[in-house]
């Protein structure tokens, strides 16, 4: 599938109707989501025919992208049942098969590296300090091949140090820097939208 086609299909998906600020629910736009998954597959071969998990999947945009790129199995995890309802509708609309699981990914008790690849757009940790690192820690425990994750560029050194020192990463590489258009979703937002610099990371776990 071509990048433009993938972005077009993701652009038709439903997003949060009532986003929850405490969960830092922001939609992963089709521009970023398509490039994230397209790069994971075309540069590294981490999606097609792989078992892919989407941590904090929200409305299922990254899950859908993985499925459209012919992942063998896609599992989306999220704590919010309303988001998972929307994600299920999106999967049905695209006619793709995705398993969705309601749970707190930071408290997952899974044994060993049971998926090939984890993709995620975790909370940035602005409402709950350290939330981004909790997601990364959880992802690195279950992925055997790679973890792809978006983090604020301003946290780059902190992310790299923690991944290599604390989270069992063999390598931690910023693949590209992207601009994340954060729409005005909450009352405390003063501006119509905010442009945030984010890094797309690829982490390679050590083999257990």
Image: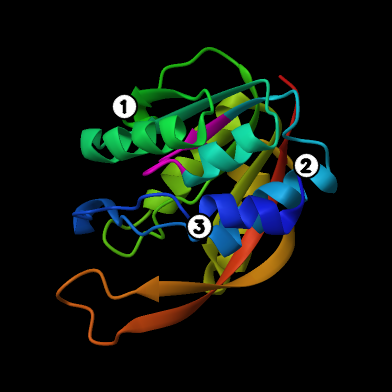
The correct choice, above or below, for 55 with respect to 149 in the image is above
Q: Main secondary structure of the magenta part?
A: loop
- Using the numbered discs, state the Cα–Cα distance from disc 2 to disc 3 in whole angstroms: 20 Å
Q: Who is closer to the viewer here, 136 or 37?
A: 37
Nearer mark to the viewer, of 2 and 3: 3
Give the secondary structure at mark 3: loop
The correct choice, above or below, for 160 with respect to 42 in the image is below
Residue range of the region highlighted in magenta in the rendering: 53-60
Residue 88 can be seen, yes or no: yes
Mark sitting earlier along the chain (1/2): 2
Q: Locate residue 168 relative to residue 131 in the image: left or right.
A: right
Q: Whole-percent x and y of residue 163? A: 62, 47
Query: Which label was assigned to residue 192?
Result: none
Give the secondary structure at mark 1: loop
The residue positioned 73% from the left and 49% from the top of the image is 38
Nearer mark to the viewer, of 1 and 2: 2
Q: Whole-percent x and y of residue 3? A: 73, 55
Q: Tell me, yes or no, whether the two marked residues, 1 and 2, touch with CB atoms within 8 Å.
A: no
Query: Which label was assigned to residue 11?
Result: 3
Nearer mark to the viewer, of 3 and 1: 3
Q: Which residue is mark 2?
A: 41
Q: Quadrant of residue 124?
A: bottom left
Q: Residues within 10 Å of mark 3 (few under 14, many from 20)?
A: some
- Using the numbered discs, state the Cα–Cα distance from disc 1 to disc 2 in whole angstroms: 27 Å
């Amino acid at each position: 599938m071509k990048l433009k086609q993938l972005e077009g299909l993701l652009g038709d998906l439903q997003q949060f109707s009532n986003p929850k600020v405490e969960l830092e629910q922001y939609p992963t736009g089709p521009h970023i989501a398509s490039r994230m998954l397209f790069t994971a597959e075309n540069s590294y071969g981490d999606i097609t025919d792989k078992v892919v998990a989407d941590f904090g999947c929200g409305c299922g945009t990254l899950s859908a992208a993985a499925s459209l790129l012919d992942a063998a199995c896609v599992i989306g995890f999220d704590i919010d049942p309303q988001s998972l309802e929307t994600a299920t509708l999106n999967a049905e609309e695209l006619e793709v098969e995705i398993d969705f699981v309601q749970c707190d990914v930071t408290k997952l008790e899974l044994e060993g590296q049971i998926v090939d690849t984890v993709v995620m757009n975790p909370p940035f940790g602005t409402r709950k300090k350290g939330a981004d690192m909790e997601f990364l820690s959880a992802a690195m425990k279950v992925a055997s091949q790679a973890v792809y994750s978006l983090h604020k560029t301003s946290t780059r050194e902190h992310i790299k140090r923690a991944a290599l020192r604390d989270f069992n990463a063999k390598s931690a590489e910023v693949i590209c820097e992207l601009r994340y258009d954060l729409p005005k979703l909450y009352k405390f937002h003063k501006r119509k939208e905010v442009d945030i610099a984010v890094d797309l990371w690829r982490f390679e776990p050590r083999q257990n």
